[in-house]
Amino acid sequence: MKMIRAIIKPFKLDDVKDALIEVGISGMTVTEVRGHGRQKGHTELYRGAEYNVDFVPKTEISVAVAESQLDEAIEAIRSAACSGKIGDGKIFVYPIEQVIRIRTGEENEDALL
């Protein structure tokens, strides 16, 4: 099992969610985050004064998948989140040792379904 953590532009969330549902992945956790990579933020104008925004608003999606769904899930996220412009985001993949569904006690891949 793997944990996919994707940092994307906020307006791409619905596209990514729909793409994941289309490949059979319905469970996900979504968090609003802020950060910067190569962008290093940007400048904005507020009441005539220019100021730096060091951290750009982003959305983080966490999805636990079976090993057999990994490549399909990554491609779904990548294609749905891609705008071709700087700041599209990153996808990180981590191993998961164990998953337990609290309500039923189901474990590992059974707990993901």
Image: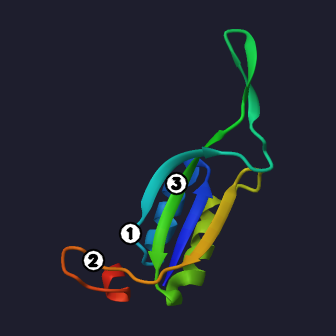
Earlier sequence position, callout 1 versus callout 2 = 1
Is residue 107 shown left or right of residue 84? left
Residue depicted at 45% across the width and 75% down the height: 64
Q: Which mark is residue 4?
A: none
Which marked residue is nearer to the observer: mark 2 or mark 3?
2
Question: In the rendered image, which residue does mark 3 sit on?
Answer: 13
Q: Decide: is 70 above or below 82.
A: below
Mark 3 residue crowding within 10 angstroms, few (<14) / some (14–19) / many (20+): many
Tag 1 near tag 2, CB within 8 Å: no
* Mark 2 surroundings: few (<14), some (14-19) or many (≥20) residues within 10 A: few
As drawn, 111 above or below 16:
below
Foreground tag (1 vs 2):
2
Find disc 1 in the rendering and name its residue: 27
Quadrant hosting residue 84 = bottom right
Instruction: Provide residue 13's location: percent of width, then percent of height.
Output: 52, 54
Q: Nearer the viewer, residue 106 or 10?
A: 106
In the picture, which quadrant includes the C terminus?
Answer: bottom left
Q: Residue 93 location, x and y as percent?
A: 60, 74
- The residue drawn where x is 61% and y is 55% is 8
The image shows residue 13, relative to residue 48, as above or below, that is below
Q: Residue furthest front?
A: 97
Which residue, given by chain and number where applicable, does mark 2 sit on?
101
Total labels drawn: 3
Toward which corner of the image does residue 91 lie, by quadrant? Answer: bottom right
- Mark 2–mark 3 Cα distance, whole angstroms, equals 26 Å
Q: Secondary structure at mark 2?
A: loop
Dot 1 surroundings within 10 Å: few (below 14), some, or many (20 or more)?
Answer: some
Looking at the picture, which amino acid does disc 1 mark?
A: Gly
Mark found first going from the N terminus, 2 or 3: 3
The residue at the point 67 percent across, 62 percent down is 90
Identify which amino acid the numbered label 2 is placed on: Arg
Under circle 1, the secondary element is loop
